[in-house]
Amino acid sequence: MQWTEIRQAYPDQWLIIEALQAHTTADSHRRLDKIAIIECCQDGAAAMQSYRRLHQQYPAREFYFVHTRREELDIRERQWSGIRRGNAAIVEV
């Protein structure tokens, strides 16, 4: 599905969506070409909880939580620099 179709089918709702096909533009915007609806949620807090649960279960999949009030999805990629805690080495002196 496309975002415009989703907005029409699920007006004024919080959703968990998955990007089935996507690409990144030169200016670091993530464009979702094909989207699947995974779950409808009561509110933003419930959507965030569901997103976290799904992301932990399936870390390789591309999930987002969004509200259909948005006319367009504005997803930007960030380049992380530095070390994440899970990959940090502990040095004892």
Image (cartoon, grey):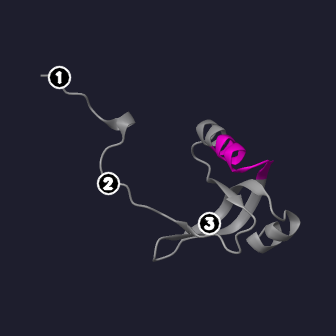
Q: Of the residues tagged 3 and 1, which is closer to the observer?
A: 1
The image shows residue 14 at horizontal and vertical percentages of: 75, 55
Q: What residue type is labelled 1?
A: Glu
Q: What element carries label 3?
A: strand
Taking depth in this image into account, of 20 and 53 the one nearest to the observer is 53
Q: Which mark is residue 22?
A: 3
The region drawn magenta spans 38-51
The image shows residue 90 at horizontal and vertical percentages of: 25, 28
Q: Is mark 2 on a helix, strand or loop?
A: loop
Q: Is mark 1 on a helix, strand or loop?
A: loop
Q: Name the residue under label 1.
A: 92
Q: Name the residue under label 2.
A: 81
What residue is shown at x 70% (from left), y 70% (from top)? 70
As drawn, the residue found furthest toward the right would be 9
Q: Would you say the residues marked 1 and 2 are in contact, meaning their CB atoms lie under 8 Å apart?
A: no
Q: Which amino acid does label 3 sit on?
A: Ala
Q: In this view, does 38 lie to the left or right of 19?
A: right
Q: Which amino acid does label 2 sit on?
A: Ser
For the residues labelled 1 and 2, the Cα–Cα distance comes to 24 Å
Q: Of the residues tagged 3 and 2, which is closer to the observer?
A: 2
What residue is shown at x 46% (from left), y 77% (from top)? 26
Taking depth in this image into account, of 25 and 64 the one nearest to the observer is 64
Q: In this view, does 38 lie to the left or right of 61?
A: right
Q: In this view, does 25 lie above or below 48?
A: below
Q: In this view, does 58 lie above or below 18?
A: above
What residue is shown at x 66% (from left), y 40% (from top)? 49
- Quarter-wise, where is residue 3 in the image? bottom right
Q: Classify mark 2: residues with Cα within 10 Å, few (<14), some (14-19) or many (20+).
A: few
The image shows residue 20 at horizontal and vertical percentages of: 69, 59
For the residues labelled 3 and 1, the Cα–Cα distance comes to 43 Å
